[in-house]
Image (cartoon, helix red, strand yellow):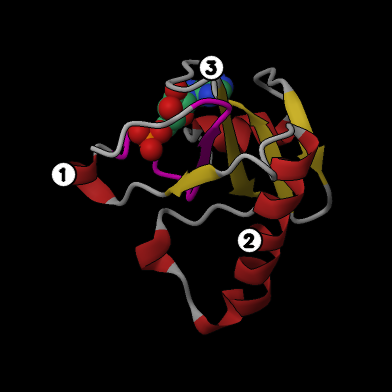
């Protein structure tokens, strides 16, 4: 999508600090980290949020979760634990309307 920041990152029009990339997905460090480790995992295709997943996205969704586990290993939080968050819509504060999963870790995370 033209005005989507994450689509621009996928196209290389906006720089990012990449952690992992393949044909379907991209993982990069969040520009404004809220934990010692804060990485975003996104599909390359524009999907607005979890609410817009379709039957066709089954494999992609599994691959996104495989990628989350792979990224956790790459950034070294697989043994210590991590949190996965996907904000949907206004009350959750979804700022970027391109499906993404936050991986947070590297320290004890607040429980609320
Ligand atoms: P959300 O509030 O769930 O939509 O989260 C969007 C996240 O994207 C925020 O944590 C931002 O810090 C992050 N973000 C926005 N622009 C960029 C960018 N250009 N590079 C990396 N992270 C970004």
CA separation, marks 2 and 1? 24 Å
Which residue of the protein is positioned furthest toward the left in this rendering?
91
First in residue order: circle 2 vs circle 1: 2
Asked whether the beta carbons under mark 2 and mark 3 sit within 8 Å of each other, the answer is no
Q: Residue visible at 65% across and 59% down?
A: 64
Which percent across, then down, holds residue 49? Answer: 40, 55
Residue 65 marker: 2
Q: Is mark 3 within 8 Å of ligand 1?
A: yes
Which percent across, then down, holds residue 18? Answer: 75, 28
The number of discs equals 3
For disc 1, the neighbor class at 10 Å (few under 14, some 14 to 19, many from 20) is few
Q: Main secondary structure of the magenta part?
A: loop
> Viewer-nearest of labels 2 and 1?
2
Magenta segment boundaries in residue numbering: 94-107
Residue position for label 3: 31
Left or right of 45 on screen, residue 74 = right
Q: Is residue 46 above or below residue 4?
A: below
For disc 2, the neighbor class at 10 Å (few under 14, some 14 to 19, many from 20) is some
Which percent across, then down, holds residue 56? Answer: 59, 80
Q: Is residue 101 visible?
A: no
Residue position for label 1: 91
From the image, which quarter does the C terminus lie in? top left
Q: Secondary structure at mark 1?
A: helix
Q: Is residue 107 above or below residue 73?
A: above
Q: Residue visible at 39% across and 43% down?
A: 97
């Amino acid at each position: 999508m033209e005005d989507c920041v994450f689509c621009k990152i996928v196209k290389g029009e906006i720089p990012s600090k990449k952690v992992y990339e393949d044909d379907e997905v991209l993982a990069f460090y969040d520009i404004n980290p809220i934990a010692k480790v804060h990485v975003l995992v996104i599909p390359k295709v524009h999907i607005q949020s979890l609410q817009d997943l379709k039957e066709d996205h089954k494999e992609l969704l599994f691959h996104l979760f495989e990628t989350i586990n792979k990224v956790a290993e790459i950034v070294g939080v697989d043994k210590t634990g991590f949190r996965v968050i996907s904000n949907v819509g206004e009350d959750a504060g979804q700022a970027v309307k391109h499906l993404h999963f936050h991986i947070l870790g590297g320290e004890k995370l607040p429980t609320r």
